[in-house]
Image (cartoon, rainbow, N blue to C red):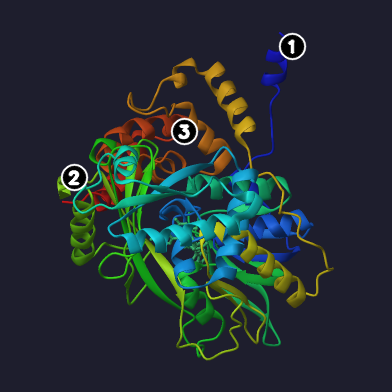
Amino acid sequence: MIYVCIVKKWNFETMNRTAQINKLKDSEIWDIVIIGGGATGAGAALDAASRGYKTLLIEQYDFTKGTSSKSTKLVHGGVRYLQQGNIKLVFEALRERGRLLKNAPHLTSTQAFIVPVYSLWDKIFYGVGLKVYDVLAGSLSLGKTKLLTTKQTIQQLPSINPNKLYGGILYYDGQFDDSNLCIEILGTAQKKGATIINYCKAIGFIKDKEKIAGVEVIDTYTQHIYKVNAKAVINATGAFTNEVVEMDDQNQQDFVTPSQGIHFVINKNLFEGSAAMMIPKTDDGRVLFAVPWYGKVIVGTTDTPIEKSNIEPKALEEEIKFLLEHINRYGTHKITRADVNTIFVGLRPLISTKNKGNTSGVSREHALHISLSGLVSIIGGKWTTYRKMAIQAIDNAAFVGKLPKKNCVTANLPIDLSVEKQNAINEIIETNPEYENKIHADYNYQLAEIVYAIRHQMATNVEDILSRRIRLLYLDARLAMQVAPMVASVMSKELNQQPDWIKQQVADFNALASKYILD
Ligand SMILES: Cc1cc2nc3c(=O)[nH]c(=O)nc-3n(C[C@H](O)[C@H](O)[C@H](O)COP(=O)(O)OP(=O)(O)OC[C@H]3O[C@@H](n4cnc5c(N)ncnc54)[C@H](O)[C@@H]3O)c2cc1C
């Protein structure tokens, strides 16, 4: 009885969009404004807020609509960088991998990987390399690297093509749910006092004697423009960095050159076993992964330079052919276009070599740039090292904004809202028992999670729910289209919307989801 009373009173401070946007109305000065709600921006928001700086983050679409929901979902040190001899980068990423698995255990996990080998030399080469990878992880190792015989390799990877197989190497890395982790990082930042708003775009800078003194932002739902004063502004816009830099200085050369990577999601019976496969070097020098994820398998990826960043990049025919050809070369099941449940594409914001400005190579993976006007741009990197990038961004923003020096406290800071989430879901079900039902019989997602995402995670439309809170678009795009009307209907009740709204939402979602289907 006492327990029920406590649950009924449950009311934790959450990401409520109206409450958050109201904070833009007062004319206070923010210590740090962060543009971009992907991994880099979210990490910066958590770092800044937990140090005690008055922090605002704005995202032009939904959180992680950019690359941060479209990764291969690996928390890794980067075996590829080891091959390139970049020990420092691998060492740093392995530290961050260990921290992330400890700080966010509910959204990350340890995953066994197998590198199949086709000669004795490869077995020695990759065996030694992956032993070094494990040694570099030190006490944060996720499991011992082992050499496998051909028989053991086939046992672990039942779908591997046995032709000329010489054995394999077993090693361990991390895996995660990228967009949900980002949303929890933002939720944690909000609990630490940050103001976090989606569908709010930076459209210009406010300047005082050539120095940035704030940002002009537009609420893309109401078209209302706010002038936001800030002591320091961080540009964490990934593949869109150049556009924001241009708003500051039209003569600045490009900072990033986008390069896209595509992924297929296929059913588990087409690539069986609980281990992931990693091909360190395909015949044209790329890395190929087949990784189990939420009961499916993600296959990827490519690395194709493109001219212009797009929030929904499109896979090129040559990339599709490359991926099909290679997964069929290494696997025994013949995978066709019809077997692909979902195809998704992310953009790497590669540091442009054209930029001759004062870009400081913090590492080969990411860079930090401070413009003459004081704009702090944090560029490149990877999801796994988001926390490290955030430290550098906030240290530099504090310097630019002349803020009191405060040390980073995120190294052991838990990013885990799972208890709050479960309590809130229980409460929703208590009031509406029908919301205990599943969205689809084959998946464990409950209808109550839709309501939770609206009330506590700023989901505003069907795409926000089915892409980035409940990952059905990434698991099976056709199935996501099937359940969209039901999701829209539940949302309409919560948001007090009319049948026309449901119709429009379903049409909008179907238009998007059709781009995730491979015809
Ligand atoms: C194919 C691929 C696979 C990858 N796999 C992995 C992996 O397995 N593991 C790993 O560690 N890393 C991986 N990475 C790298 C990782 O995904 C990226 O480094 C990371 O997601 C980049 O995050 P970001 O926040 O910098 O960019 P983004 O996630 O793109 O976020 C930038 C945000 O800024 C917003 N924005 C832009 N302009 C404005 C504006 N004017 N106002 C407001 N908001 C704006 C955008 O809408 C966007 O949401 C992968 C990358 C790719 C491309």
Check disc 1 and report its element: helix, strand or loop: helix
The residue under label 1 is 2
Kind of residue at disc 1: Ile
Q: Look at the numbered discs 2 and 1 and tell me whether their residues touch, using CB distance below 8 Å.
A: no
Label 3: how many residues lie within 10 Å, few (<14), some (14-19) or many (20+)?
Answer: many
Give the crowd class for mark 2: few <14, some 14-19, many >=20 residues within 10 Å.
Answer: some
- Residue found 54% across the figure and 47% down from its top: 181
Residue furthest to the top in view is: 1
Asked if residue 249 is positioned above or below residue 147 in the image, the reply reads below
In three-dimensional space, the C-alpha distance between marks 3 and 2, rounded to whole angstroms, equals: 39 Å
Q: Horizontally, is 488 left or right of 324 in the view? A: right
Which badge, 3 or 2, comes first in the chain's sequence?
2
Nearer to us in this view, 31 or 331: 331
| Coordinates of residue 400 in the picture (x, y in percent) | 74, 77
Q: Nearer the viewer, mark 1 or mark 3?
A: 1
How crowded pointer 1 is (Cα within 10 Å; few <14, some 14-19, many 20+) is rated as few
Q: What numbered label is drawn on residue 450?
A: 3
Image x and y of residue 74, in percent: 46, 52
The span from disc 1 to disc 3 (Cα, nearest Å) is: 28 Å
Q: Secondary structure at mark 3?
A: helix
Q: Residue at x 19, y 43 (%)?
A: 339
Q: Amino acid at mark 3?
A: Ile
Q: Could you tell me how many numbered marks the image carries?
A: 3
Q: Find disc 2 in the rendering and name its residue.
A: 332
Asked whether residue 368 appears in the rendered view, the answer is: yes
| Residue drawn at the location 33% of the way across and 65% of the way down | 281
The reply to whether residue 505 is visible in this rendering is: no
